[in-house]
Amino acid sequence: MIPEIGHFALILALSLALCQGILPLIGAHRGNVAMMSVARAAADGQLLFIAIAFACLTWSFLQSDFSVAYVASHSQLALPTVYKISAVWGAHEGSLLLWVLLMAGWTVAVGRFSRDLPAEFAARVLGVLGLLSTGFLLFTLLTSNPFLRLTPAPVDGADLNPLLQDPGLAIHPPLLYVGYVGFSVAFAFAIAAMLSGDLDQRWARWTRPWTTVAWLFLTIGIALGSWWAYYELGWGGWWFWDPVENASIMPWFMGTALIHSLAVTEKRGLFKSWTLLLAISAFSLSLLGTFLVRSGILVSVHAFATDPTRGYFILAFLGIVIVGALVLYAIRAPQLDSQAGFHLLSRETFLLLNNVLLVVAAAIVFYGTLTPLLYDVLRLGKISIGPPWFEFAMLLPLLPISLLIAVGMHSAWRAQAPKPLLQRLRLPALLAIAIGILVPGLIYGRFGLLVSIGTMAAFWIMFASLQEPWRSFRRAKGTPAITRAMLGMSVAHFGVGIFALGITLVSAFTVESDQAMQTGATVQNAGYSFELRELRDVQGPNYQAIEGRVEIRKDGEFVGEVRPQKRQYLVQQNWMTEAGIDAHWNRDLFIALGDQLGNDTWSVRIQYKPMIRFIWLGAFIMALGGLIAITDRRYRGGA
Amino acid sequence: MTPRRQRMLAVGLALGGIAIAAVLTLRALDDNMMFFIDVSDVVAGEYPADRNFRVGGLVVDGSVEREPGSLELRFRVTDLRCELPVRYTGVLPDLFREGQGVVAHGRMAGEGEFVADTILAKHDENYMAPEVAESLAEHVTEQTAGLRQGSGECNPQ
């Protein structure tokens, strides 16, 4: 009964989405107020019914209703309650339901906060969101219905994939989705502007906070995913250039470019058509990511060919969205020309460079992700492209960006005189160069060109980001304080510096070793000694495990104790590595059990990872910067 | 700067950047692109001699031998037609088992042995790497259908 209510609620939501997608757009075209005012009510209703559907599916999971096929294949009686809830979005069907729920939530939020916008414009934005929502609801109902029944119902379910039974992965997809879906708002704003043909600086001011919110959630979502991969996959890496990860980083690069280009459009009325194009691409890449992950095409081009319904649906949807948006763009973009100019040395130029480099970064990831698919489709052979290629290729756009950020931040709009800029940046630059040359050698005992450049860039960004807030802090009475927008930018860029420092030092100074260890044996790694004290059996709620107790000492002094586990999940019989991590602000010691080599002897993976926390910390600081920026005075109170 | 020159600059920068990136990345791609090659083809000598590639198949039952006290091990991998000896030193993935599908990255050493630097086994009992599944399926079909004379048998180099 409950699942059927969910199913019906979803159908009702679809009808409302259709109303929301069609009537307001016609109303805005004809200037019909009644039709336009449908938008907000329809959006509220849509959210209500999708929330009911979501609650019904959650209920089925909590009740372990295995007559629902989706529950039966992704849960079991002994699964801890928190994972029964996270299992709702743990696989394809449920994650789509989460997607439409979040999309409805975003739409209602747009409806609430758009009351000061011109009525036609708000109606168009909500209408476009309604059309997108219609597409996703249709996709859910036609190809991926989570409420389908299974007869006869099994006694117990097949369990949730053990990899997903983890707090990090329970909250990672919702955050990531908030980001993905959030770009649909920027997309809707772009389409609405093109439909009305009216794109001025106010448009950019309305769009900016929404885009920033989407971006900050995407940032946190990606960072959490990376953190999860680090401690859960058992390899100690933090980014694997796996296609699924790539699918999330492409919209991130585009979204970051969009945020910066929106700044130019708002302040100077420039880059208008470019901003529109970025808004379209950021959302299209979110959709493409969904297509790659959800169609099965990554698992195999041929798996896609044998069950193509889902894939074709998303591909068709993707085609309509992208082609439609680009056709509209081709018609409207020429009218958006702007006459304002800027000097070669100006903030505009640096933001332009930022955009070009970020787009190049996204293009590289795109190329590396899709080339193996292309080879396979054309039957040129089955290739894989290794992480070393991505790591090298990413340096090309990202190294120049990290060197240019500081200069761009301190340049004025329109034209910047070279001398004052040089004066202002001289001290941070000199300090950064000194640190870049000395730190790697003094602390880690090894010099290297790339390490020095990376460290230098990181500190340069950090120092340059601190200058404005510092000046504001020490300002004379009566002079204006730093704006929230400026502060947010400084914080976010400081985060980039932290992030860059983390990556540089982890890539350069990680020490890894795989060892055979007997109980009682001691191994040295990176100045620490690791003693495997004992191995014992541990019983979990739905798994049994062998747990090692490893004592870590440095120069004889006790540092910590970790308990890495090798778990076997009872239902799926899968083995899983649960790493033991001794975390400290400036280094992680990562210990994972490999395989049993003999009596009391195991292969053990031991890694020393300096500054790895800075990678995620940097990402969180970037997101925090976004949060500060959207509280700026000028976004309050609308037009 | 006039809008026209502005646009020229933008386009010039974009094209220049993309061109440089494209040249450098394509050259690097050459070193990092690994082809998947059937075990039978490797045994027949059809593999790139001077670069890494991937092989995959089932780990032959009873073929895993460990060097006592070290992380070195040897096993054979089969595509159900030919078998290839593989040597690997390091920690194995969680799902490495005899009789299960596996993919190895590495290159051929002397004496027909494949030296792997990475071993991958997928995190799901039901799921086999698509390349492996396809390679196995091909040879199973050959054998059951008893196609051409001599096919279905291993033809070493």
Image: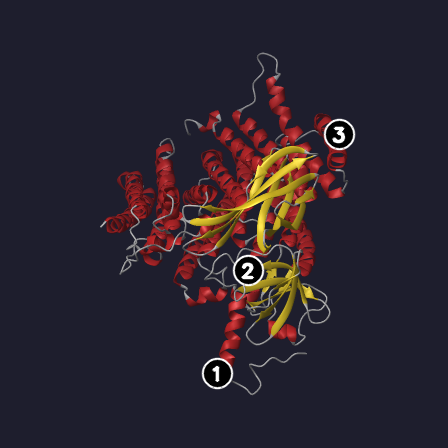
Name the subunit of mark 3.
Answer: A
Horizontal relation, residue A494 to residue A92: left or right: right
CA distance separating discs 3 and 2:
52 Å
**On the same chain: label 2 and label 1?**
yes
Residue A347 in view in this figure = no
Can you tell which of label 3 and label 2 is closer to the viewer? 2
Q: Secondary structure at mark 2?
A: loop
Image quadrant containing the C terminus of chain A: top left
Disc 1 target residue: B145
Three-letter code, disc 1:
Ala
| Vertical side of A146 occupied by A492: above or below | above
Determine the image quadrant of residue A398. Answer: top right
Which numbered tag is attached to residue B96? Answer: 2
Contact check, label 2 and label 1, Cβ < 8 Å:
no
Indicate which disc, 2 or 1, sits on the residue closer to the N terminus: 2
Q: Nearer the viewer, residue A123 or A371?
A: A371
Q: Secondary structure at mark 3?
A: helix
Residue A92 at x, y = what percent? 40, 53
Residue in the image at 54% along x and 86% along y: B148
Classify mark 1: residues with Cα within 10 Å, few (<14), some (14-19) or many (20+).
few
Residue A57 in view in this figure = yes
Q: Secondary structure at mark 1?
A: helix
Name the subunit of mark 2.
Answer: B
CA distance separating discs 1 and 3:
74 Å
Three-letter code, disc 2:
Phe
Horizontal relation, residue A390 to residue A165: left or right: right
Can you tell which of label 1 and label 3 is closer to the viewer? 1
Which numbered tag is attached to residue A430? Answer: 3
